[in-house]
Amino acid sequence: MVAKKQIQPDSFLQFKYVSSPSFSPDGKWIAFVVRRPDLDSNSYPGDLYLADGDGKNVRQLTVGGDAKGYCWSGNDTLLFSAKRSQHYKELAKEDGDFTVFYEISVSGGEAREAFCLPVPVTGIRRISDDLFLLTTFCHCGRQDFYATPIEERQKMAKAYNEECCYTFEDHPFWTDDQGITTGRRVGVSLYRRSTGELKPVTDPCFNATSIDANDKYILLSGESYAHMRPKLHGLYVYTIATGEMRCLIEPRTREVGISLLWGENALFAGKPTDVHEDTRMYCDMFLMPLAGGEAKLLCGYDHYIGRGTLNSDARLGGGKGIMLDGDKVFFIATVGTRNDLYSVDAEGHISEPLTPAGSCDGFDRFNSNTVWVGMYGDNLTELYLNGEAITSFNTEYRETHDVVALEPLVYHGEADIDGWVMKPTDYQPGKKFPVIFHIHGGPCTAFSDIYHHEMQMWANHGYFVIFCNPRGSDGKGEAFANIRGKYGTIDYEDLMHFLDYALSQYPDADSDRVGVTGGSYGGFMTNWIVGHTDRFVCAVSQRSISNWIIMEHTSDIGLYFAAREQGASTRTDVEKMWFHSPLKYAPNVKTPTLFIQSDHDFRCWMAEAVSFYSALQFNGVETKMCLFKGESHELSRSGRPKSRIRRMNEIMAWMDGHLKK
């Protein structure tokens, strides 16, 4: 028997990330994207792949590594944006606000330049062979920028790049994983290929948050604002034939989430109009006539609609989370510890899961056929058609590496807490092994039994790995998930109880050698834990929150998120904000702590980590900070490959140095 390879920090370089499946308009073909980590370019090149409509004859269609966003332009042609032609390079010398689209046939051959648009396009969708819906970045207050001749635009761009300071006049002024975004909005336009007409649907100050379209209408939620982005969006319908835009739900009046066209109606996720305070986690489903009128409840729902929340650092890319097919709407949701596809009919009846237990991460449908990207057990992302895997990009990795099986465990306390234990690959009964206790982000996400690279790596390097879903996690409904105003209380109790229970069930997991780590909410909880107990030998706090007062006023989502999650703001109850802030308890900390932080993380800005790090230095506690240059909140999942490797090496060295002495 051939020995399997030990999983290392850089083993993810062998992954193939599958995403964005879609049927051709006639259902004859299935297109999708495959991306791979590349150390030389320190990026994730992506190419288009193609399968027959029956899932056979899978083949690569592009080879340039720059085809990540695409749409079908006809039954047998695809459009994708790229930065490859001399034309583009000439345009982009001084001004990068152009998008060049290329077209390629399913028969293969060279992709040819199809058209160039004088706007930065972030998404494209086919309405017909001639008409396309675009989402673009636009600039509030610079209405005529994209109509300006290129020579003038280049001068304006050059002058802007030479400015010695940023000027903020709106909020949010930066966005995680995007950088400084002051004045920038997500706009919607229509492009007619036969005439070259680019027609704006929204005004330059409108920011679209959810978009759907068919050959008659465009449905969009969002709001127009000059300074402060409002908390509640409006819902609008645009008639393509007439160019008329009508408001169905006024902004700032009720919660409107993801929305979808359903015949002459709009389906949207929302909350009742009498819910004035944002106390509920989840939205129900409502139907509203496009002609106007009252929104009526289609069905209540106790989970997120149109997206899954299972944690993994082994997926990359997107895909549809909700769509209409025939007389039903299909959507992804996390229920329990699985992401599944469901359907809802016009009477509000929701189906049983339509996909196997695991993680359905993006899908498409055509004539009752379903294609989706899935992660199941120890399998990495592959493409599935009607339940059968039609790709095997990651089979070799799974077969040649020492992937550890997860052992489920449930703690029965005030609430049932689901979790898992991974034994070290060199496990020997009767021998003691150190432990890493891992806490997920969110908090309203969830761990499951799907592949998680860094936890597999820890188990491969001699650790028991313990993780769970405390109250506050997704998948079990409102009563379980809603810990607003309770951070650091019942969730802390659940985590400690589960850890104690797991250690009692696995006596070879050394309770005297336990380290704790987590990112985002998991970083907050790591900070909270070391301020409330000395039981852990060491800690690694990643992209964390240490002070809700700082977070409220520096995070790109802080003004709404902090107040909503803490049930208070600095305007209403600053003492409560401080009570739930780990920095308040920093004088108690004795645990050696490593901080992993990115300087372009605008979700949990580096002031959070710097503050806690400084407080621990003042205590005389052993501590270290790794501040990653140019990385965002997504460092552990989609950060540049070299940064991800360095991050995992730093964490491993810290754990080894304290738990393997």
Image (tube, helix red, strand yellow):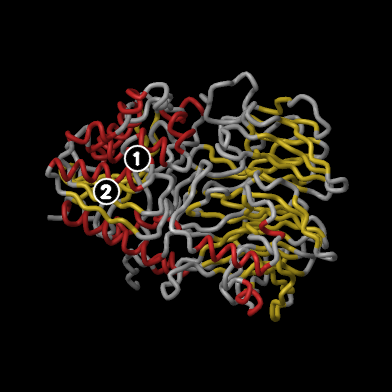
Taking depth in this image into account, of 219 and 61 the one nearest to the observer is: 219
Q: Secondary structure under badge 1?
A: loop
Q: Secondary structure under badge 2?
A: strand
How many marks the image carries: the answer is 2
Taking 136 as reference, is 269 above or below it?
Answer: above
Residue 72 picture location, percent across and down: 74, 63
Taking depth in this image into account, of 429 and 578 the one nearest to the observer is: 578
- Check disc 1: other Cα within 10 Å, few if <14, some if 14-19, many if 20+: many
Taking depth in this image into account, of 86 and 448 the one nearest to the observer is: 86
Q: Which tag is nearer the camera, tag 1 or tag 2?
A: 1
Disc assigned to residue 545:
1
Residue 176 picture location, percent across and down: 47, 50
- Check disc 2: other Cα within 10 Å, few if <14, some if 14-19, many if 20+: many
Judge left or right: residue 117 versus residue 582: right
Judge left or right: residue 69 versus residue 346: left
Specify the amino acid type for callout 2: Val
Taking depth in this image into account, of 536 and 275 the one nearest to the observer is: 275
Residue labelled with disc 2: 540
- Residue found at x 34% / y 73%: 2
Mark positioned earlier in the residue sequence (1 or 2): 2
Residue 371 picture location, percent across and down: 66, 56
How many angstroms separate mark 1 from mark 2 (CA)? 13 Å
Q: In the rendered view of the protein, which quadrant contains the N terminus?
A: bottom left
Residue 612 picture location, percent across and down: 25, 42
Q: In the rendered view of the protein, which quadrant contains the C terminus?
A: bottom left
Specify the amino acid type for callout 1: Ile
Judge left or right: residue 254 versus residue 567: right
